[in-house]
Amino acid sequence: MHPAADWIYSQLKDDFPNLSMGTVYRNLNILIEQGLVKKIDFGSTFDRFEANITPHYHFICESCGAIIDLDLPIDESLNEHVQKETSYLVSRHKIEYFGVCDRCRLSG
Amino acid sequence: MHPAADWIYSQLKDDFPNLSMGTVYRNLNILIEQGLVKKIDFGSTFDRFEANITPHYHFICESCGAIIDLDLPIDESLNEHVQKETSYLVSRHKIEYFGVCDRCRLSG
DNA sequence: TTAACTGCAAATGGTTTGCTCTGTC
DNA sequence: GACAGAGCAAACCATTTGCAGTTAA
Protein backbone atom coordinates (compact mmCIF):
# COMPACT_ATOMS: atom_id res chain seq x y z
CA MET A 1 0.00 0.00 0.00
CA HIS A 2 1.58 3.24 -1.19
CA PRO A 3 -1.29 5.67 -1.30
CA ALA A 4 -1.28 9.28 -2.37
CA ALA A 5 -2.88 11.86 -0.09
CA ASP A 6 -5.68 12.00 -2.59
CA TRP A 7 -6.49 8.34 -2.22
CA ILE A 8 -6.43 8.46 1.56
CA TYR A 9 -8.81 11.37 1.44
CA SER A 10 -11.31 9.64 -0.81
CA GLN A 11 -11.19 6.46 1.26
CA LEU A 12 -11.97 8.33 4.47
CA LYS A 13 -14.45 10.73 2.93
CA ASP A 14 -17.27 8.20 3.11
CA ASP A 15 -16.93 7.77 6.86
CA PHE A 16 -16.00 11.40 7.58
CA PRO A 17 -17.95 13.56 5.16
CA ASN A 18 -16.42 16.76 6.52
CA LEU A 19 -12.86 15.59 6.12
CA SER A 20 -10.59 18.06 4.34
CA MET A 21 -7.30 17.63 2.54
CA GLY A 22 -5.64 19.91 5.07
CA THR A 23 -6.40 17.40 7.78
CA VAL A 24 -5.09 14.52 5.71
CA TYR A 25 -1.78 16.28 5.07
CA ARG A 26 -1.50 17.55 8.64
CA ASN A 27 -1.90 14.06 10.05
CA LEU A 28 0.37 12.49 7.47
CA ASN A 29 3.09 14.92 8.48
CA ILE A 30 2.55 14.14 12.15
CA LEU A 31 2.91 10.43 11.41
CA ILE A 32 6.06 11.15 9.40
CA GLU A 33 7.52 13.13 12.31
CA GLN A 34 6.76 10.22 14.59
CA GLY A 35 8.44 7.86 12.17
CA LEU A 36 5.30 5.82 11.57
CA VAL A 37 4.96 6.78 7.94
CA LYS A 38 7.45 7.52 5.20
CA LYS A 39 7.12 9.71 2.16
CA ILE A 40 8.15 8.04 -1.09
CA ASP A 41 9.93 10.12 -3.70
CA PHE A 42 9.69 8.34 -6.98
CA GLY A 43 9.72 11.16 -9.47
CA SER A 44 6.18 12.28 -9.83
CA THR A 45 4.24 15.47 -9.37
CA PHE A 46 2.69 14.21 -6.14
CA ASP A 47 3.86 12.33 -3.08
CA ARG A 48 3.01 8.85 -2.01
CA PHE A 49 3.22 7.42 1.47
CA GLU A 50 3.84 4.09 3.09
CA ALA A 51 3.41 2.63 6.55
CA ASN A 52 6.08 -0.02 6.06
CA ILE A 53 8.95 1.70 7.83
CA THR A 54 11.34 -1.26 7.83
CA PRO A 55 14.11 -0.66 5.31
CA HIS A 56 13.32 -2.14 1.92
CA TYR A 57 13.80 -1.54 -1.76
CA HIS A 58 11.07 -0.61 -4.21
CA PHE A 59 10.04 -1.83 -7.60
CA ILE A 60 8.15 0.69 -9.70
CA CYS A 61 6.08 -0.45 -12.65
CA GLU A 62 6.55 1.96 -15.51
CA SER A 63 3.36 0.76 -17.11
CA CYS A 64 0.80 1.17 -14.31
CA GLY A 65 2.76 3.19 -11.77
CA ALA A 66 2.44 0.60 -9.02
CA ILE A 67 5.02 0.78 -6.26
CA ILE A 68 5.85 -2.63 -4.86
CA ASP A 69 7.91 -3.42 -1.78
CA LEU A 70 10.68 -5.88 -2.50
CA ASP A 71 11.26 -8.67 -0.02
CA LEU A 72 15.02 -8.66 -0.43
CA PRO A 73 17.73 -8.10 2.17
CA ILE A 74 19.27 -4.65 2.38
CA ASP A 75 22.85 -4.83 1.16
CA GLU A 76 24.68 -2.81 3.81
CA SER A 77 28.01 -3.57 2.19
CA LEU A 78 27.12 -1.11 -0.55
CA ASN A 79 27.46 1.74 1.94
CA GLU A 80 30.91 0.59 3.01
CA HIS A 81 31.98 0.13 -0.57
CA VAL A 82 31.03 3.64 -1.56
CA GLN A 83 32.53 5.06 1.61
CA LYS A 84 35.86 3.41 0.80
CA GLU A 85 35.81 4.57 -2.78
CA THR A 86 34.88 8.15 -2.05
CA SER A 87 35.80 8.98 1.56
CA TYR A 88 32.28 10.36 2.09
CA LEU A 89 30.47 9.18 5.20
CA VAL A 90 27.71 6.94 3.87
CA SER A 91 24.87 6.18 6.25
CA ARG A 92 22.22 4.69 3.99
CA HIS A 93 21.15 4.13 0.45
CA LYS A 94 18.01 3.80 -1.57
CA ILE A 95 17.40 1.52 -4.53
CA GLU A 96 14.50 1.68 -6.93
CA TYR A 97 14.03 -0.85 -9.66
CA PHE A 98 12.03 0.04 -12.74
CA GLY A 99 10.28 -2.21 -15.21
CA VAL A 100 6.97 -3.98 -15.78
CA CYS A 101 5.03 -5.74 -13.05
CA ASP A 102 3.35 -9.14 -13.42
CA ARG A 103 -0.10 -7.81 -13.92
CA CYS A 104 0.95 -5.48 -16.74
CA ARG A 105 3.19 -8.07 -18.33
CA LEU A 106 0.41 -10.66 -18.42
CA SER A 107 -2.29 -8.29 -19.58
CA GLY A 108 -0.39 -6.95 -22.32
CA MET B 1 26.75 20.14 -11.71
CA HIS B 2 23.17 19.47 -10.70
CA PRO B 3 21.50 22.85 -10.94
CA ALA B 4 17.95 23.79 -10.14
CA ALA B 5 15.97 25.78 -12.70
CA ASP B 6 16.37 28.73 -10.38
CA TRP B 7 20.13 28.58 -10.51
CA ILE B 8 20.22 28.26 -14.29
CA TYR B 9 17.98 31.26 -14.54
CA SER B 10 20.13 33.46 -12.32
CA GLN B 11 23.29 32.41 -14.14
CA LEU B 12 21.87 33.37 -17.52
CA LYS B 13 20.06 36.46 -16.33
CA ASP B 14 23.21 38.57 -16.50
CA ASP B 15 23.74 37.84 -20.18
CA PHE B 16 20.05 37.74 -21.10
CA PRO B 17 18.30 40.35 -18.98
CA ASN B 18 14.88 39.53 -20.42
CA LEU B 19 15.13 35.83 -19.72
CA SER B 20 12.11 34.37 -17.99
CA MET B 21 11.62 31.20 -15.97
CA GLY B 22 9.14 29.96 -18.55
CA THR B 23 11.88 29.88 -21.13
CA VAL B 24 14.25 28.09 -18.78
CA TYR B 25 11.71 25.35 -18.07
CA ARG B 26 10.63 25.12 -21.68
CA ASN B 27 14.16 24.57 -22.88
CA LEU B 28 15.00 22.19 -20.07
CA ASN B 29 12.05 20.05 -21.10
CA ILE B 30 13.15 20.12 -24.73
CA LEU B 31 16.61 18.95 -23.70
CA ILE B 32 15.05 16.22 -21.57
CA GLU B 33 12.94 15.05 -24.52
CA GLN B 34 16.07 14.95 -26.62
CA GLY B 35 17.82 12.93 -23.95
CA LEU B 36 20.50 15.53 -23.39
CA VAL B 37 19.46 16.38 -19.85
CA LYS B 38 17.98 14.35 -17.05
CA LYS B 39 15.74 15.42 -14.19
CA ILE B 40 16.91 14.28 -10.79
CA ASP B 41 14.32 13.28 -8.24
CA PHE B 42 15.89 13.33 -4.83
CA GLY B 43 13.01 14.16 -2.57
CA SER B 44 12.80 17.88 -2.51
CA THR B 45 10.20 20.50 -3.30
CA PHE B 46 11.98 21.43 -6.50
CA ASP B 47 13.71 19.60 -9.34
CA ARG B 48 17.35 19.52 -10.20
CA PHE B 49 18.88 18.69 -13.55
CA GLU B 50 22.06 17.17 -14.91
CA ALA B 51 23.75 16.99 -18.27
CA ASN B 52 25.64 13.81 -17.44
CA ILE B 53 23.40 11.32 -19.17
CA THR B 54 25.67 8.31 -18.82
CA PRO B 55 24.24 5.94 -16.20
CA HIS B 56 25.68 6.58 -12.77
CA TYR B 57 24.75 6.54 -9.12
CA HIS B 58 24.39 9.58 -6.90
CA PHE B 59 25.63 10.52 -3.49
CA ILE B 60 23.55 13.12 -1.69
CA CYS B 61 24.99 15.05 1.22
CA GLU B 62 22.38 15.39 3.91
CA SER B 63 24.25 18.30 5.40
CA CYS B 64 24.65 20.67 2.45
CA GLY B 65 22.35 19.07 -0.10
CA ALA B 66 25.08 18.57 -2.67
CA ILE B 67 24.43 15.92 -5.29
CA ILE B 68 27.60 14.18 -6.38
CA ASP B 69 28.02 11.76 -9.29
CA LEU B 70 29.67 8.53 -8.24
CA ASP B 71 32.37 7.12 -10.47
CA LEU B 72 31.40 3.52 -9.86
CA PRO B 73 30.32 0.85 -12.34
CA ILE B 74 26.61 0.17 -12.72
CA ASP B 75 25.83 -3.24 -11.30
CA GLU B 76 23.58 -4.70 -13.97
CA SER B 77 23.39 -7.99 -12.12
CA LEU B 78 21.08 -6.32 -9.62
CA ASN B 79 18.38 -6.15 -12.28
CA GLU B 80 18.69 -9.84 -13.08
CA HIS B 81 18.68 -10.72 -9.43
CA VAL B 82 15.44 -8.87 -8.74
CA GLN B 83 13.87 -10.21 -11.91
CA LYS B 84 14.61 -13.77 -10.80
CA GLU B 85 13.28 -13.19 -7.31
CA THR B 86 10.09 -11.46 -8.35
CA SER B 87 9.28 -12.38 -11.96
CA TYR B 88 8.85 -8.71 -12.77
CA LEU B 89 10.61 -7.46 -15.88
CA VAL B 90 13.40 -5.26 -14.56
CA SER B 91 14.97 -2.88 -17.04
CA ARG B 92 16.94 -0.51 -14.83
CA HIS B 93 17.56 0.65 -11.33
CA LYS B 94 18.54 3.76 -9.46
CA ILE B 95 20.73 4.00 -6.39
CA GLU B 96 21.16 7.01 -4.19
CA TYR B 97 23.57 7.04 -1.30
CA PHE B 98 23.04 9.42 1.60
CA GLY B 99 25.50 10.73 4.12
CA VAL B 100 28.00 13.55 4.63
CA CYS B 101 30.33 14.80 1.94
CA ASP B 102 34.03 15.61 2.45
CA ARG B 103 33.57 19.32 2.68
CA CYS B 104 30.90 19.07 5.38
CA ARG B 105 32.77 16.38 7.25
CA LEU B 106 35.94 18.46 7.40
CA SER B 107 34.23 21.74 8.24
CA GLY B 108 31.70 20.25 10.61
C1' DT C 1 4.91 34.42 -44.46
C1' DT C 2 5.74 30.91 -42.04
C1' DA C 3 7.94 28.61 -38.27
C1' DA C 4 10.48 28.63 -34.19
C1' DC C 5 11.24 30.77 -30.07
C1' DT C 6 10.66 34.28 -26.55
C1' DG C 7 8.75 37.25 -22.55
C1' DC C 8 5.13 37.95 -19.81
C1' DA C 9 1.55 36.83 -16.97
C1' DA C 10 -1.88 33.82 -15.66
C1' DA C 11 -3.10 29.17 -14.58
C1' DT C 12 -2.13 24.68 -12.44
C1' DG C 13 -1.96 21.52 -8.76
C1' DG C 14 -0.09 19.34 -4.79
C1' DT C 15 0.90 20.89 -0.28
C1' DT C 16 0.91 24.10 3.66
C1' DT C 17 -0.94 27.45 6.78
C1' DG C 18 -3.98 30.86 9.39
C1' DC C 19 -8.01 31.26 11.62
C1' DT C 20 -11.97 29.92 13.75
C1' DC C 21 -14.85 26.50 15.76
C1' DT C 22 -15.83 22.38 18.16
C1' DG C 23 -15.41 18.87 21.63
C1' DT C 24 -13.11 17.01 25.84
C1' DC C 25 -10.97 17.07 30.31
C1' DG D 1 -11.31 27.80 30.56
C1' DA D 2 -7.47 25.44 28.17
C1' DC D 3 -6.06 22.73 24.73
C1' DA D 4 -5.92 19.56 20.93
C1' DG D 5 -7.64 18.59 16.67
C1' DA D 6 -10.67 19.75 12.67
C1' DG D 7 -12.82 22.29 8.69
C1' DC D 8 -12.49 25.76 5.52
C1' DA D 9 -10.37 28.73 2.55
C1' DA D 10 -6.53 31.23 1.29
C1' DA D 11 -1.65 31.15 0.55
C1' DC D 12 2.45 28.97 -1.35
C1' DC D 13 5.58 27.80 -4.83
C1' DA D 14 7.66 25.12 -8.47
C1' DT D 15 6.23 24.28 -12.88
C1' DT D 16 3.33 24.73 -17.04
C1' DT D 17 0.77 27.07 -20.49
C1' DG D 18 -1.68 30.60 -23.50
C1' DC D 19 -0.92 34.39 -26.05
C1' DA D 20 1.08 38.00 -28.45
C1' DG D 21 5.43 39.80 -30.17
C1' DT D 22 10.01 39.09 -32.40
C1' DT D 23 13.40 37.09 -35.35
C1' DA D 24 15.32 34.44 -39.10
C1' DA D 25 15.04 31.63 -43.24
Image: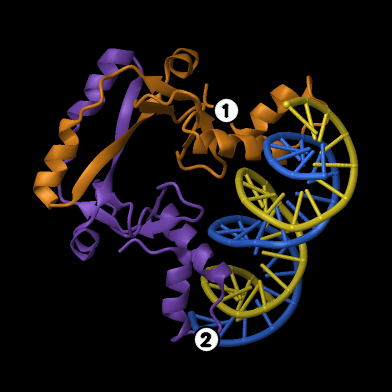
Chain colours: A purple, B orange, C blue, D yellow
The amino acid type, in three-letter code, at marker 2 is: Pro
Residue A67 at what x, y percent from top left?
31, 56
| Residue at the extreme left | B84
Rendered position, D12 above or below B12? below
Mark 1 nearby-residue class (10 Å; few <14, some 14–19, many ≥20): some
Quickly name the residue at label 1: B3
- Category of crowding for the residue at label 2, using alpha-carbon neighbours closer than 10 angstroms: few (below 14), some (14–19), many (at least 20): few
The answer to whether residue A54 is left or right of residue B12 is left
In this rendering, would C24 be left or right of C4?
A: left
Q: Chain of mark 2?
A: A
> Which picture quadrant has residue B14?
top right
**Measuring 24% from the left and 62% from the top, which residue is drawn there?**
A108
Both marks 1 and 2 on one chain? no
User: Which residue corresponds to the image point at 14% horizontal and 45% vertical from the top-left?
Assistant: B83
Badge 1 marks a residue whose secondary structure is loop
Residue C11 located left or right of residue A86 = right
Instruction: Read off the residue under disc 2.
Output: A17
The residues bearing labels 1 and 2 have C-alpha atoms spaced at a distance of 44 Å
Secondary element under disc 2, as helix, strand or loop, is loop
For badge 1, the amino acid type reads Pro
Q: Position of residue A101 (x, y in %)?
A: 23, 56
